[in-house]
Amino acid sequence: MAVGPYDPQSYWLVRFVFQRGLGLLYLLAFVAAVRQFRPLAGEDGLLPLAEYREHIDLRERPSLFYFFPDDRAVAIAGWLGVALSLLAVTGLSEQYGTAVSVGIWAMLWVLYQSFVNAGRTFYGFGWESMLLETGFLAIFLGASDVGVHAAVIWLLRWVLFRNMFGAGLIKLRGDDCWRDLTCMQYHYETQPMPNPLSWVAHHLPDRAHRWSVGVNHVVELVIPFLYFAPQPYASIAGAVTIAFMGWLMLTGNFAFLNALTMVLAVSTFSDGVLTALLSVSTPAVASVPPVLNGAVWLLLVVVLLLSYFPVRNLVSSSQAMNRGWDPLHLVNTYGAFGSITKTRYEVVVQGTRDEELTADTEWETYAFPGKPTDTDRRPPQAAPYHLRLDWQLWFAAMSPGPRRHPWFVHLLAKLLAADEGVRALLRRDPFGDDPPTHVRALRYRYRFTTPEERAETGDWWHRERVGTYYGPVSLADDGFRSVLRRRGWEVPDAKVLPE
């Protein structure tokens, strides 16, 4: 059936683009799970999987790993997720009918749900819930040989609206710098993980920073209402959102938050708009199958009912950030950067092979793939890949010690034991297979160098030590070993260095 240039009822091409984008994000998420979940939250992870099984109610955080709490199950689930994601990216998931399509997208959702709920702290980010919510809706899009139920498209826009509008509201209610338009003077330098262009953006004129905050407020507080407008206005709003997210990706590493928002923004387009822009045509397809049609209407009712608490949160003066009210992450509230840190702190982890510590002890520094350590290293680009340990180290550095981050003590113990899993999360281990006798963590204040300082030294960062974060400790310290035992963690034996 022919469609007009802005017919909002045709979404075959929209679904095609959306599914490829979502499949790619699932692929990145499962690759990260394969590489990182076991050393972070597996059997012998920094937060061992047994803790999840022993202390978490299955009804509150359901996961397949509750029934199979071992690394073998983690590996199988991770690689299965990778394989299914490849089917989604290539479109093979849509070539064998709606039943197969529904099954593949449902399996992706179940598998990733298991990683998020069992991963706890290391998976406690708003974009994890948003990927699950979006992935659940993708189950109901149907295969390529049938039409798309318009209600699913509108529900995807509803996710996008809550993400953007929630972020805008929490900024207005949060830090004063969002109201006096000065937040961007700090953001590029103090964000969790700056990238190569962050240094450049930080040194833009103050007027540019103020304008960018104003643009942020318009994009997050005004544009979202146009997602539900007639075409072409909804598409224009989606294009503005994609451009805004593109700028954030160019100037920072926010895992797959920006990329997922861009994929969601595809739902604001219609086939009429996309075919006019891309000069492509869409095939004739069958109508939505009756069973899928009924399931979508049931889905609509469920989402409307579960939206009560997220909406109440949005209009509340005590708005919470990135929160869910159901154990399956079906309908959540979102909002990022309600407050901006004005000073950047970093934890620098070091070790030595000296048996006795003296003022002359030489310490070697561990380096991580994303977070700043070496002052002369150019900030890397990692997103949309998610470096979970690096992100948690950013949070940890905000406090003068690891009391609120007990996994950090376990990290030091594993470095002392040359744990292979943890070492795989590092960019540089100065000790190789021969671990240190002692480790310590220092706390530094970091700031970007000025253009003059960088021209003179070549450094991207200037740092100043502000204290000791933890240690020094060794595996021979009874006090350190007792700390590990109180948490129920296995205490590794100190390795004997070769003569």
Image (cartoon, rainbow, N blue to C red):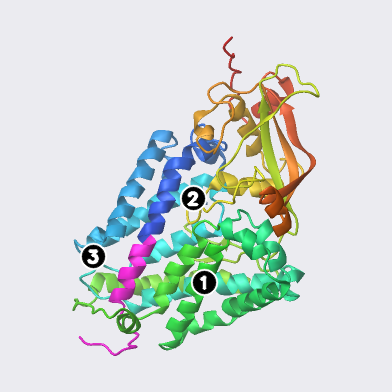
Residue under circle 1? 307
Q: Which residues are the magenta region?
A: 1-22
Q: CA distance from mark 2 to mark 3?
A: 27 Å
Q: Secondary structure at mark 2?
A: helix
The x and y percentages for residue 139 are 34, 63
Residue under circle 3? 98
Residue under circle 2? 116
Q: Nearer the viewer, residue 445 or 178?
A: 445
Q: CA distance from mark 1 to mark 2?
A: 21 Å
Residue most extreme to the top: 499
Residue drawn where x is 55% and y is 57% of the image: 253
- Sequence-wise, the earlier of marks 1 and 2 is 2
Inspect the image, locate mark 1, and give the three-letter code of the amino acid beneath it: Ser
Is residue 423 something that shows in the picture? yes
Please identify the quarter of the rendering in which residue 131 is found: bottom left
Please identify the quarter of the rendering in which residue 429 is found: top right
Is residue 100 shown left or right of residue 488?
left
Q: Residues within 10 Å of mark 3 (few under 14, many from 20)?
A: many
Q: CA distance from mark 1 to mark 3?
A: 27 Å
